Image: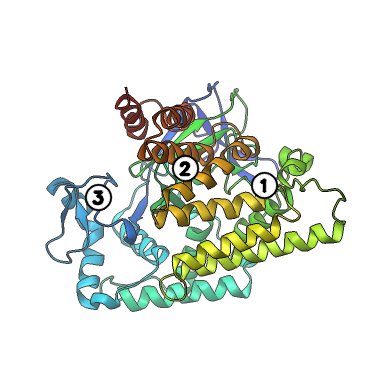
Amino acid sequence: MKNEGIEGTERFPSPDKGRGLRAVRHFAVGELVFACPAYSYVLTVNERGAHCEQCFTRREDLFKCGKCKQAYYCNVDCQRGDWPMHKLECVAMCAYGENWCPSETVRLVARIIMKQKVTTERTPSERLLLLKEFESHLDKMDSEKDEMNQTDIAALHHFYSRHIRDLPNDQALTELFAQVNCNGFTIEDEELSHLGSAVFPDVALMNHSCSPNVIVTYKGTVAEVRAVQEINPGDEVFNSYIDLLYPTDDRKERLLDSYFFTCQCTECTSKSKDKEKMEIRKLSSSPEAEEIQSMIRYAKNVIEEFRRAKHYKNILFIWNELLEMCELSLDKMGAVFADANVYMLHMMYQAMGVCLYMQDWDGAMSYGEKIIQPYSIHYPAYSLNVASIYLKLGRLYLGLEKKTQGVKALKKALAIMEVAHGKDHYYVAEVKREIEEQK
């Protein structure tokens, strides 16, 4: 495997990181470094009926599977293409009816197992890294993660054991679930809405940096890796594994918890953006250090509380209560934190999402306007997070008949998307069409 490459890159032993990917030629900003089809993927249940299960195309005239009535396709070709994987779920969904509820990870692992049973050769997704080479980090998992793994294994047996012959033993399943949890990807649309989950082995080869030189976007079920910084021959190619909004200690904590390493990238060692990200409100008397630390603890707790509440919203919470939680936390944090503080921005973003769901367009616009400028400062260049806010704002403005502001915001989104998604991406064409319609 040493020094095998794909399209101007090669696998190599990365110092202190194990294996990695490096460039063997120059890549300009916006240039496609490589593309990788998904080894296995699954459309999220909430997007059924809006996207094709096979190619993830978004359209209104999809037709549904005649058996389960739950999977939707562009045409017969897409349905036939998906059948080797869908037949597994189709039978199970028909058998369990409303009681069919495996997690997305369980669904993805079931598809991986099915593919492994019929695949004997290296796939186009594994030109540099085989799925079986994925790190599992089983030796670093705590009891909570191990318990979650065992719950997923039990669900796999419950929903699929009748439909998959000879499931791997529990030891092999424990490793596979751990590998997928550490190396899986979330496929998102142009507004960063969740579409599904997948594994892209060659993309997983890239190591992490909090100042990445590439970005990963999706064209259907193909991952595309594009340069967002100039990359020279010999440079390692770095992706970001996490949301880069947060200060260094938060990022390090999440990386250690989810990926089991301590980041030593230049951004983490310099902490160059931390002061701006943790901006304190200017008052006649500055808050004490303990007061700031206390508010940081509160912010982290309320973020986790909101995440749990949102997850169980259909059972325990209604959307008005979620919005109230955002507003109350913003009031409390605002006594210490400036509006551009990342913890304030986090809750503003959540509030914007709730307002969009509730069709409170003015409320969503108000939060988006507060978010966008600090986002543009805190995130790296060509950030999808920044593009998605400009996109949402642009569409909100147009819906509220603010044509000039709408076109301006859409053009800001487009400038980022042409680099991150590529000028030939259908999301880019869609935004251009929206702009043209305003002329």
**Residue 207 numbered tag:** none
Q: Residue at x 16, y 47 (%)?
A: 61
Quadrant location, the C terminus? top left
Measured Cα–Cα span from mark 3 to mark 1 = 40 Å
Can you tell which of label 3 and label 1 is closer to the viewer? 1
Q: Which residue is mark 3?
A: 52
**Residue 339 numbered tag:** 1
Q: Residue at x 51, y 69 (%)?
A: 309
- Number of numbered discs present? 3
- Residue 168, image x and y in percent? 39, 70
Measured Cα–Cα span from mark 1 to mark 2 = 40 Å
Rendered view: 245 above or below 172: above
Can you tell which of label 2 and label 3 is closer to the viewer? 3
Rendered view: 383 above or below 78: above
Q: Give the secondary structure at mark 2.
A: helix
Rendered view: 421 above or below 295: above
Q: Give the secondary structure at mark 1.
A: loop
Rendered view: 195 above or below 216: below
Task: Describe residue 284's horizontal placement relative to residue 84 as left or right.
Answer: right
**Residue 202 numbered tag:** 2
Q: Residues within 10 Å of mark 2 (few under 14, many from 20)?
A: many
Q: Amino acid at mark 2?
A: Asp
Q: Nearer the viewer, residue 115 or 206?
A: 206
Label 3 vs 1, first from the N-terminus? 3
- Residue 333, image x and y in percent? 70, 58
Measured Cα–Cα span from mark 2 to mark 3 = 24 Å
Label 1 vs 2, first from the N-terminus? 2
- Residue 239, image x and y in percent? 56, 40
